[in-house]
Image: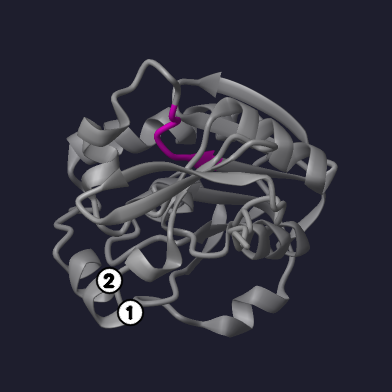
Amino acid sequence: MTIKVICTVCLGSDTELSHLIEGKEYFKCNFCDVLFLSSKDRLDPYAEKDRYSQHKNDIYDPQYRKFLSALYHPLTQKLKPDMKGLDYGCGPGPALAEMFREDNYTIDIYDPYFFPDKSLLNKKYDFIACTETAEHFYEPNKEFMRLDSLLEKGGWLGVMTNFYNDSIDFEDWYYRKDPTHVVFYTEQTLEAIALMMTWSIEIPANNVVLFKK
């Protein structure tokens, strides 16, 4: 009897082994179209944190800020100056939060490794920014449920992650090769998440999605 692997996004059981690469198993969900790494092939928490600690993102680096602006600009077009936000999964160098503060937004920062203030997870926010974080989610369904609980009704969630599509050579894709990247979303996946959460969805730019609660 074949044991089905449960999809980490929609929790469905209609999954299949999609790729076996260097001994690592990647599964595809036939409902929400996500690709995800088998739990047995993930890094342990110590190795994962060590990998993140190697990121050298200067919060004032203009090139890094230009990269983040792909999410920052479309998200701020939806916001009012008095709105309060959260940079969720900000990493060791919360440059995006600094960009918001420079434009007089109030914003908290949360990261499970570098800024693990769990009291923030009991608050409510008008907007949440989640850049280069969603691909690290071991339990995306639980994470998106948490993000929903953090958002005020009418609030915005901006997510930036490299979208996967069939034109990409998955085995050779640089984004897959990062050992901390464990889940790869297509536009269909994002639409499925919006449906599950009863959010509206906009895709204003490549690799950027805005959800409204």
Q: Is residue 133 visible?
A: yes
**Quick one: label 1, few (<14), some, or many (20+) residues within 10 Å?**
few
Q: How is the image coloured?
A: one colour
Please state the horizontal and vertical placement of residue 153, each as a whole percent of the image. 85, 50
- Looking at this view, name the residue that lies furthest to the front: 1
Q: Which residues are magenta?
A: 159-164
Magenta-colored segment: predominant secondary structure: loop
**Mark 1 is on which residue type?**
Pro
Up-down relation of residue 209 to residue 133 (above or below): above
Mark 1 highlights which residue? 45
Quadrant into which the N terminus falls: bottom right
Residue found 44% across the figure and 75% down from its top: 112
Residue at 47 percent of width and 35 percent of height: 72
Q: Secondary structure at mark 1?
A: helix
Compared to residue 201, the image places residue 91 above or below, namely below
Residue 6: x, y in percent? 63, 59
Q: Quadrant of the C terminus?
A: top right
Are dots 1 and 2 in contact, CB under 8 Å?
Answer: yes
Say whether residue 163 is magenta.
Answer: yes
Residue at position x 58%, y 59% in the image: 5
User: Crowding near pointer 2: few (<14 within 10 Å), some, many (20+)?
Assistant: some
> Is 152 or 191 nearer to us in this picture?
191
The amino acid marked with disc number 2 is Glu
Is 60 placed left or right of 187 in the picture?
left
* Residue assigned mark 2: 48
Residue extending furthest top?
Answer: 167
Mark linked to residue 81: none
Question: Left or right: where does residue 147 sit relative to residue 67?
Answer: right
* 59 on left or right of 33: left
The foreground one among 181 and 6 is 6
